[in-house]
Image: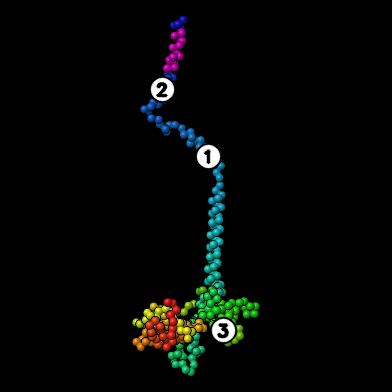
């Protein structure tokens, strides 16, 4: 009986031994390396399947932001283009400097020399944003004011204090062909002016090798005649009267305690001023002048 049992269990034991051997062959030992490439990438496949199942969200925010930037840039560009076009072609503002040439026959008289009668000058009107108007003729100028109004009868009108009048005006032309300002006096038909937009060149040049007196630099006031003098290191001299009339000169000091100062109206001219210092007191043409900016 025991022999029969041995015979029956022998095949089972052999089968178990084979399974253990195959298990040992399939399982790597501690010294053996596992080839990762032979392991199926289960996780990656799952991730790919999950990503394919999930719907892709549209990038609404980025698209909306791009549209907003495009609209903003378009509006800004259109506004800049409008400003440029308006400034070049449709600008009807008086702000700026306008000039016209005084012809010789307008100023010549019986006392004029041949050179004076043949000379012409440039008059300029500078209209500022603050309502100030500076009228310049050569190196002489006077400060005044202006006011603009719009009327049904005469259209745009401007009152200029330095011209003591009110003028109807219109502006024509553009930045390429040149702008013109036409002004007609409302009370005198023969008082018409045609001015061009633009600046004037400085009609004066400093004296060559000018001798300057540094003690003169600064502002001085002649109280008796209500005149202000101003000298600077450039050799300029400004003489301002009580009514705001300013004459700009270039000066040089002569040996006889005199200031030789040249100025320009229709043509260049000069005059002399006597001056002397008595301590800190300055006399110009015999009148005491007081330092204003000590």
Q: Which of the labelled discs sits on residue 164, or is there none?
A: 3
Q: Which of the labelled discs sits on residue 118, or is there none?
A: none
Q: Give the image's coloring scheme.
A: rainbow
Percent x, y of residue 221: 45, 82
Mark found first going from the N terminus, 2 or 1: 2
Above or below residue 243? Residue 17 is: above
Q: Which residues are magenta?
A: 5-17
Percent x, y of residue 48: 51, 38
Residue 69 on the magenta segment: no
- Helix or strand or loop: what does disc 3 sit on? loop
Mark found first going from the N terminus, 3 or 1: 1
The residue labelled by disc 1 is 51
- Helix or strand or loop: what does disc 1 sit on? helix
Q: Which of the labelled discs sits on residue 24, or is there none?
A: 2
* Secondary structure, magenta segment, majority class: helix
* Residue 173 in sight: no
Above or below residue 46? Residue 153 is: below
The residue at 41%/22% (across/down) is 24
- Residue found at the very far top of the displayed protein: 1
The residue at 56%/49% (across/down) is 60
Q: CA distance from mark 2 to mark 1?
A: 39 Å
Q: CA distance from mark 3 to mark 1?
A: 87 Å
Disc 3 crowd, CA 10 A, few/some/many (<14, 14-19, 20+): few
Callout 2 touching callout 1 (CB < 8 Å) = no
Percent x, y of residue 138: 46, 83
Along the line of sight, the residue nearer the viewer: 93 or 224:
224
């Amino acid at each position: 009986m025991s022999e029969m049992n041995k015979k029956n269990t022998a095949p089972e034991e052999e089968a178990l031994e084979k399974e253990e051997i195959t298990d040992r062959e399939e399982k790597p030992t501690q010294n053996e390396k596992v080839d990762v490439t032979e392991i199926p990438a289960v996780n990656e496949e799952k991730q790919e399947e999950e990503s394919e199942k999930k719907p892709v969200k549209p990038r609404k925010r980025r698209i909306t932001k791009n549209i907003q930037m495009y609209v903003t840039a378009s509006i800004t560009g259109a506004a800049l283009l409008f400003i440029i076009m308006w400034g070049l072609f449709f600008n009807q503002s008086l702000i700026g400097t306008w000039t016209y040439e005084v012809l010789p026959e307008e100023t010549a008289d019986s006392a004029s020399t041949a050179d004076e009668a043949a000379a012409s000058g440039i008059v300029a009107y500078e209209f500022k944003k603050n309502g100030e108007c500076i009228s310049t003729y050569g190196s002489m100028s006077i400060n005044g004011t202006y006011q603009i109004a719009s009327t049904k009868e005469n259209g745009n009108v401007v009152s200029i204090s330095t011209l003591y009048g009110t003028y109807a005006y219109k502006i024509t032309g553009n930045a390429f062909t040149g702008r013109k300002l036409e002004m007609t006096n409302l009370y005198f038909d023969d008082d018409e002016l045609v001015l061009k937009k633009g600046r004037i060149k400085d009609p004066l040049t400093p004296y060559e090798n000018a001798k300057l007196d540094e003690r003169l630099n600064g502002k001085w006031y002649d109280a008796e005649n209500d005149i202000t003098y101003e000298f600077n290191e450039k050799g300029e001299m400004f003489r301002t009267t009580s009514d705001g009339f300013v004459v700009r000169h270039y000066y040089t000091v002569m040996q006889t305690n005199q200031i030789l100062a040249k100025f320009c109206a229709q043509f260049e001219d000069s005059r002399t001023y006597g001056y002397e210092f008595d301590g800190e007191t300055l006399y110009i043409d015999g009148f005491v002048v007081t330092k204003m900016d000590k």
